[in-house]
Amino acid sequence: MAADDRFTRDFREMHKDRPLGTRNEIVTGPVADWATDFSHLEPEWAAGPYPIQDDLRRRCPIAHTRRFGGGWLPTRYEDVAAIAYDTEHFSSRSIIMSNFRPPRELAPMGGTPPISSDPPFHHGARKLLLPAFTKTAVAKQEPTTRAFCHSLIDAFDGQDVVDAAHDYAQHIPMRVIADMLGFPPEDGPQFREFVENALEGVNLPPEERIARMSKLFDYLLAQIRDHVQNPRDDLTTYLINAELNGQKLDPSHLAGTMALLLIAGIDTTWSAIGASLWHLANTPDDRERLVAEPGLLSTAMEEFLRAYAPVTMARLVKEDMHWHGIDMKADDWVLLSFPAANRDPVQFERAGQVVIDREVNRHAAFGLGIHRCVGSHLARMELRVALEVWLERIPMFTLEDPSAVTWAAGQVRGPRTLPVRIR
């Protein structure tokens, strides 16, 4: 059988009659008490979760909800870290808290390895990706990333107001990931749809979520078939030829990893760039200082990552247990809020303030434990270059209408609309 036909067959089988796991009811609606009824999908959470998290940390450090079939939300750094490092009691087979749970049969690989993988499978799956995300490999992407950022700003010519999220931040990681995977750059609009389906459609019926995700895997299938027929020097061809334990990657492993790179590689960085620009548009003193002291940017962007960490990850409790004074049930969700951990005053001085010259900053924006972001060097490069080019080209900018700024709901938070005046 030809290689491309094998991929077609195996991809189709991967989705045929796939078990949907445990289903739960619709989970949105007004929150009665964030300590006992939290929901990260609500508008007030998207608009600004930090006061909610601060209040929970003071009076109820591990919140609970019956929504999503039952879940927990630790808000102290020490609790988030403890769970992130504890792979014995918490599974990563599903990292998105939603209205249904993928079946236990998906472990230890999970649907999007290695981020969804448990030990011992995780180690080999992660190791495969490391060569593509070293500092040396990432440095090769910087010249084209910088040139692309300039081209985006060139397109602002004659405009007084632009959307820094929609017209700038989102396009940068889309182009970088497309180049790395060898995907057509003009497919960017599809990438945005894939991201929204995966991360913001968590309250849809399971069957609809599966159908929407199938569009992503159909796209990946087409790209894989093209790469099988026309190999080139990119990450997709590398993964097609990669071996784990002496064997080529299972089609579900290959597809899941590519889906992870496409979705996580875009939304997290897009959100970090957008939040940083929002802060600078909203804080003239910091903006003016960075323009005057460009050498401070590397320190400042670490503070932006701490203060506006975009990512919250989920875990599933493996078995009934008593943990840190609470009774957790098997398959309870646990939301690892790295944004909340990053604003814990026990861990950080002036935790609720953005201090752009903060010298000691061991933040958790890229996660903790075995699942710490494999693409952190790439994300840092994209964030740094995006801010360098913007501040060089547009040193003076302000929010056009603060009320017009919107933020994504769910587990990756960043500005979705960010109108700024640039003249």
Image (cartoon, rainbow, N blue to C red):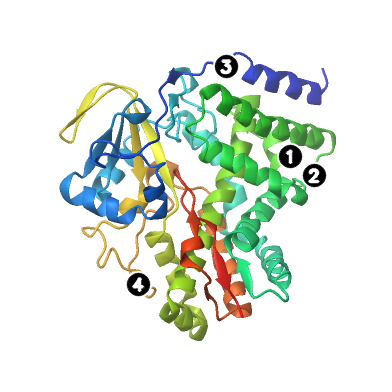
Q: Secondary structure at mark 3?
A: loop
- Residue where numbered disc 3 is placed: 18
Q: Is tag 4's residue or tag 1's residue first in the polypeptide sequence?
A: 1
Alpha-carbon distance for marks 3 and 1? 27 Å
Residue 401 in percent (x, y) is at 50, 68
Instruction: For the residues labelled 2 and 3, say whether their Cβ atoms are less than 8 Å apart.
Output: no
Q: Quadrant of the C terminus?
A: bottom right
Apparent side of residue 143 relative to residue 377 in the rendered image (left or right): right
Instruction: For the residues labelled 2 and 4, say whether their Cβ atoms are less than 8 Å apart.
Output: no
Q: Residue at x 55, y 37 (%)?
A: 198
Residue 126 in percent (x, y) is at 52, 39
Which image quarter: residue 386? bottom right
Q: Which mark is residue 355?
A: 4
Q: Is tag 2's residue or tag 3's residue first in the polypeptide sequence?
A: 3
> Is there any visible trace of residue 5 in the rendered image?
yes
Alpha-carbon distance for marks 4 and 1? 43 Å
Type of residue at label 1? Thr
Residue 323 in percent (x, y) is at 20, 32
Alpha-carbon distance for marks 2 and 1? 6 Å
- Of circles 3 and 1, the one toward us is 3
Alpha-carbon distance for marks 2 and 3? 32 Å
Type of residue at label 2? Arg
- Residue where numbered disc 1 is placed: 237
Q: Which mark is residue 54?
A: none
Q: Secondary structure at mark 2?
A: loop
Where 385 falls versus 223 (above or below)? below
Q: Secondary structure at mark 1?
A: helix
Alpha-carbon distance for marks 2 and 4? 45 Å
Which image quarter: residue 4? top right
- Residue where numbered disc 2 is placed: 232
- Of circles 2 and 4, the one toward us is 4
